[in-house]
Image (tube, rainbow, N blue to C red):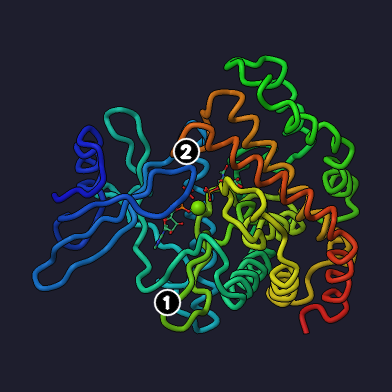
Amino acid sequence: MNYQEIATGACEKIEEAAGRFRVNGTPSECRRYGSGHINDTFLLRTEDGEQGHSYILQRMNTHVFQDPEGLMRNVSGVTGFLRDEIIRTGGDPLRETLTLVKTESGEDYYVDSLGSWWRMYLFIPDAVGYDTAEKKGIFYQSARAFGRFQRLLARYPVSLLTETIPDFHNTPKRYEAFCRAVEADVCGRVQGVGSEIAFVTDRKEEMSIVADKLESGEIPRRVTHNDTKLNNVLIDSRTGQAVCVIDLDTVMPGTAVFDFGDSIRFGANTAAEDEKDLGRVSLSLPLYETYTKGFLEGCAGSLTEGEIRLLPWGAKIMTLECGMRFLTDYLEGDRYFRIHRPEHNLDRARTQFALVADMERKWDEMRRLAECAGHTRGQ
Ligand code: ADP
Ligand code: GN1
Ligand code: MG
């Protein structure tokens, strides 16, 4: 097989794994793919006479996902459910949801001789995952897709879902973990980040605003995606329409307020998540407005007034939480998020805090825009 940009040590295991799945043709080419921070993702091509086929091969991150079997049950259940819904409404299931490729022995995953977990999806062609919302239309499409995704899953039986990362968006617990990391200071990095730590602790009271409402039942717990980054929706490269919501590892009970918020955190930032020049970081109110409109349309009237009122808080808390997670990882020695340079996690944390600060400046407008969109929701 021909490998591109892959360390030689890894090739043998990729070859072993690729050979276990029921692909059409013979694996011929493999390269790293996408810009996710968690799994190792490869694009695998096969040769099959005149034709070639493409697949996504992933080595799952079992440090992050400690119950990979439960996770794969979720992915299989959710994709199967979406597939039925898509067929029922006349869509194309091979394009509009992920399709797992089975192993030769009929499993959804393969565990190699080193204990690494592998899975494979059909590659969705002519579709792109964007790292920045270059055009408003792309962001609007992603908003509709994530809104629709959670509306479709409203009928999915929660009892079938494993919580793949317990307390994933439990922000007060994330704060506790952050405080433990500061206290332990295992890498001796605390002294260099005093102002970032103070930024977080100054906002301690805000961490529980959405969590408390979820706990008290004021807003409903729903089946949500929980990782609604713009690059977790594939956009059709010809039509510009959203094709498929991907990265289903964190589909769990959660709140729509955070699905909304995490998208704003990533896609309505005028700079990249790891931009070093903080002067370029800001919240784009036009993008925020566009996303709000698209998300409420995608949810088609299913969000409650309480949820709509909390949307700005969802954006702010997701940004604060993510910054806190990047900073925690920096303090603990970069063990969770994949980094590509020293201090990458610190740079990421700083952009998140700069974005929170800008949201605070634009808070009244954020609230007004959410209210306005709420009045015309789903119409
Ligand atoms: P991570 O959890 O590391 O973010 P993802 O599951 O999001 O991993 O995959 C990483 C990238 O691979 C995505 O952002 C997307 O660009 C691409 N990708 C994943 N699955 C598919 C697929 N079935 N078809 C086409 N591209 C895909
Ligand atoms: C991770 O897997 P990916 O790259 O789509 C992370 C998200 C963070 C995001 C920050 C399972 O998302 O929670 O918000 O990085 N996923 C997990 O970019 O922790
Ligand atoms: Mg991803």
Residue 229 picture quarter: bottom right
Decide which of tag 1 and tag 2 comes sooner along the chain.
1
Residue 110: x and y in percent read 32, 41
Looking at the rendered structure, the number of numbered marks drawn on it comes to 2
**Residue 240 located left or right of residue 28:** right
**Residue 205 located left or right of residue 191:** right
Q: Residues within 10 Å of mark 1 (few under 14, many from 20)?
A: some
Residue 162 picture quarter: top right
Q: Amino acid at mark 1?
A: Ser
Kindly identify which residue carries mark 2.
Answer: 338
The disc label shown at residue 237, or none: 1
Residue 109: x and y in percent read 36, 45
Question: Nearest the camera: 266 or 39?
Answer: 266
> Which residue shows up at 53% across the image and 79% down it?
88
Visible residue check, residue 66? no
Residue 165 picture quarter: top right
- Quarter of the image with the C terminus is bottom right
Visible residue check, residue 99? yes
Residue 288: x and y in percent read 73, 67
- For the residue with label 2, is its CB less than 8 Å from the closest atom of ligand 1? yes
